[in-house]
Amino acid sequence: MQPPVKNGFNMFLGNSTEWRLSNGPAYLNSPPAYIEPESVTLDPSRAFLKDVKRLIVKVGTAVVTRSDGRLALGRLGALCEQLKELNSRGYEVILVTSGAVGLGRQRLRYRRLANSSFSDLQKPQGEFDGKACAAVGQSSLMALYDTMFSQLDVTSSQLLVNDGFFRDAGFRKQLSDTVHSLLDLRVIPIFNENDAVSTRKAPYEDSSGIFWDNDSLAGLLALELKADLLVLLSDVEGLYSGPPSDPNSKLIDTYVKEKHQKEITFGDKSRLGRGGMTAKVNAAVCAAYAGTPVIITSGYATDNIIRVLQGDRIGTVFHKDAHLWAHIKQVSAREMAISARDSSRRLQSLNSEERRKILLAVADALEKNLSLIMEENGVDIADAELAGLEKSLISRLALKPEKIAGLVKSVRMLADMKEPIGQILKRIELADKLTLERISCPLGVVLVIFESRPDALVQIAALAVRSGNGLLLKGGKEAKRSNAALHKVITSAIPETVGDKLIGLVTSREEIPDLLKLDDVIDLVVPRGSNKLVSQIKESTKIPVLGHSDGICHVYVDKAANIDMAKQIVKDAKIDYPAACNAMETLLVHKDLSETGGLNQLVAELTKEGVELYGGPRASGLLNITKTSSFHKEYSSLACTIEIVDDVSAAIDHIHQYGSSHTECIVTEDPEVAETFLRQVDSAAVFHNASTRFCDGARFGLGAEVGISTSRIHARGPVGVEGLLTSKWILRGSGQVVDGDRGVTYTHKELPIIA
């Protein structure tokens, strides 16, 4: 006896979950979630991932193909590499793929072009039959998957199905047995609907039957094959509160049917496939509420499937128990930024002494809560060591008592600095009783994204208070507990008249893309971290970005150097704090010192301190050390590169070619050579007979630094309070009007600045 058939794969779910959507991508009208630090104890929306063994990944046509219809080979390659990695880790992986019709259409177009005469091409060209496209494309698509997986030493298999097959209980059992056999053999089954013999009407507008596209097929298979997780890959990050192209749209982290079902509206369907976001939401709801969790995320990223299984907060989660999860306080990224701006304006309205007292209260709070901060930091360090993170990263992560004492000192130094806000920078008499002033004022809202270093949070927060700016902070997940503790301590010292929203701590990674869209409410982004981090941020935002990507600092020891002095400077520049961005990474030595013994003394000094040495082409042969793989290398550890140069001009050329425009030093007793170096080296900081480690906001007397900038616009070098200020013009008149400039006699006279 045939089982009863209902619309869609709801035949497996029962009447209570029968819910149909119309065509077009879906989006919601409510803002997404931002999770405040105190709420982050357990993330229920990702907790189920630890039990996943069998997963189904569905990749859509928009991911498989480019905008011109050709195959997106890079994305397909990344997909196959991720599935191979999961397969090798012991996951049971099943792939549902679209793209056969698009690939077949592309091949048929090429064949028609190759076989047509010029006169044929002048005639109107009809569209190809979709089923013919599917028949041609299926074999080509599978051949491509087979080739890619074979290169990765993985075996794949093809299973073409139609919805009619699932009416047969015997077929469903045989399908399950076959898939289980393949998975036992570590083979990746690849499913696709057999569009070539589908009974649906072209152009696939018929959504009758058990499943009606590859999204619903993936949902059906998730239930039939008892998958632990279904991942639907899309051309956007997940389900949004509005059209994904709208800057005001927010990513929905967790879909709750009771809350969101009635709020869904629809736009256009997929540019290439049949369903778009509507089909994905429909399939996700049906599968999730029948027991298989679903995550919709972007298939454009090269590692999103891996990140999903690691528990990263990406995409949109669909889960039958989502309505039971603990309520999480929700604040959108935009609301965070607006709150920070509002608080900054209240901060600016205070007088200088009131702002000073806030900083002193912050310093006192840090001292009072030292044990709490150390305890939380200790947990972060233990977790980092357990995770096998690099020693340089763990070094940056550590908060020792003396480091916290130094931070407290810096905060108090900032409190005692001259008032930076409202300073008159220029006064001009434009005409009689018409005076123009340029005064200093805060930028507005600054977003700082930093990796590993929790001490940066204290410095940046203190600078924000002193400069009157609102602040949003995003630290690395390896310092999550340290950052949360420091943020709580600092904001507890901010009076209610200003509000603790002055400094916001972003704790979820998926908020970064949202924040980087907010160019209307965030005025500056300061990334502090790896070259990759800085590059990604610069490519992802219209907001001005201030910072540096690399800290490849040089020390050049001239032939006229005092060698004893040079040894001390070189040692300090390398070993005082190897992980710092102002630590020496390359030592350049004048060629004459290789003959006088000076080079050997410098090498001995570094070797004695345990520094691992790598040489350039000249130094590696002379010193018999390993040749460096690149001069443009930031070790951030007890290692550095040595190279021999002919003279100061060669040293300057080397720095310009391989450096990062951060900090450079010359050691010499020849004032003429020193001046040549200081004038010609184009870096943010250039020193004579002093360690590169002096390039620091606190050591420069700035109190603290938000970072070190290697850009040439606005601020350069250590960025303190002044780097977080801009200016505005104030005009004081007595009723003057322009009136074509007929009634004004301009004087444009410089006036003394009144303190």
Image: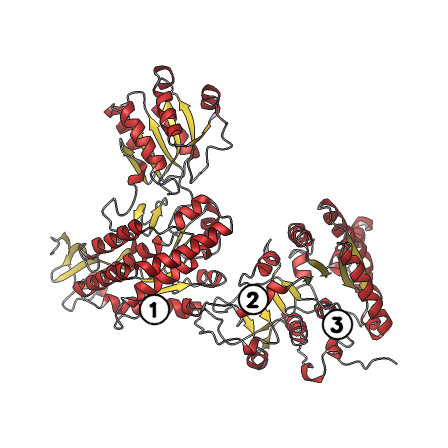
Q: Is residue 390 above or below residue 239?
A: above
The three-letter amino acid code for the residue at tag 3 is Trp
Image spot of residue 745 (x, y percent): 15, 58
Residue designated by label 2: 46
Residue designated by label 1: 501
The three-letter amino acid code for the residue at tag 1 is Lys
Q: Closest to the observer: 522 or 389?
A: 389
Image spot of residue 166 (x, y percent): 82, 72
Question: Mark 3, mark 2: which one is toward the viewer?
Answer: 2
**What residue is drawn where x is 32% and y is 23%?**
558
Q: Is residue 465 left or right of residue 278?
A: left
Q: Helix or strand or loop: what does disc 1 sit on?
A: helix
The three-letter amino acid code for the residue at tag 2 is Arg
Residue designated by label 3: 212
Name which quarter of the figure residue 557 lies in.
top left
Q: Is residue 679 left or right of residue 201?
A: left
